[in-house]
Amino acid sequence: MRHDHCSADFRRIASLRPLSLALLAGLLLSPLAGCGIKQPIEGRKDPYVPKQVNLAEPDLQRRTAFREPIVTRRDGLLFVTLPVRAASDQNLHLDYRYTFFDQNGQILEETGWLAHKTLVSRLWTEIRFNSIHQEAADFRVDLRYSRVQQH
């Protein structure tokens, strides 16, 4: 009887084998039929709208102070002056980059990280830059600690 029980199990497994092969074939062929297409992963919307002046490191927020940017237009180009100072007892070495946008918010020009600017402890200085496109309507400037080796 024990032998009958084993052969019954074997027959049951053997009968499942063609079914398993059919399922496997169906799974392998279904992408070819268009059934296995996966939905793309969508990016999430950032709830934070960038300001005109942005800092790359949180520590810069307490170590710098800014006044309102001064924006003028000369010969159709946008000129920006950003008053800034080191609000600490130490000089700060910063890199900055800027982006200009048209009236629809489309990027017109974008720089890489420019040479560093040294902020002398507690003294005001200015970061100045201008557009090269007359269509420039707005700007953004990003600042970070300088990656340039100081001598």
Image: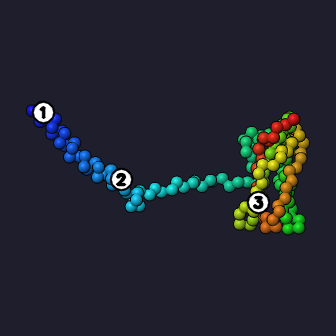
Q: Quadrant of the C terminus?
A: top right
Task: Label 3, secondary structure: give it.
Answer: strand
Task: Give left or right: position of 9 versus 38.
Answer: left
For residue 150, which quarter of the picture? top right
User: Which of the two discs, 2 and 3, sits closer to the camera?
Assistant: 2
**Mark nearer the N terminus (2 vs 1):** 1
* Snapshot colouring: rainbow
Q: Which mark is residue 3?
A: 1
- Identify the residue shown where x is 77% and y is 51%: 112
Residue type, mark 2 in image = Leu
- View extreme (top): residue: 2
Residue type, mark 1 in image = His
Q: Residues within 10 Å of mark 2 (few under 14, many from 20)?
A: few
Query: Where's residue 118, x and y in %?
Result: 86, 42
Spatial CA span between label 2 and label 3: 49 Å
**Which residue in the protein does label 3 denote?**
109
**Which residue in the protein does label 2 denote?**
27
**Mark nearer the N terminus (3 vs 1):** 1
Residue 81 vs residue 67, the one in the foreground:
81
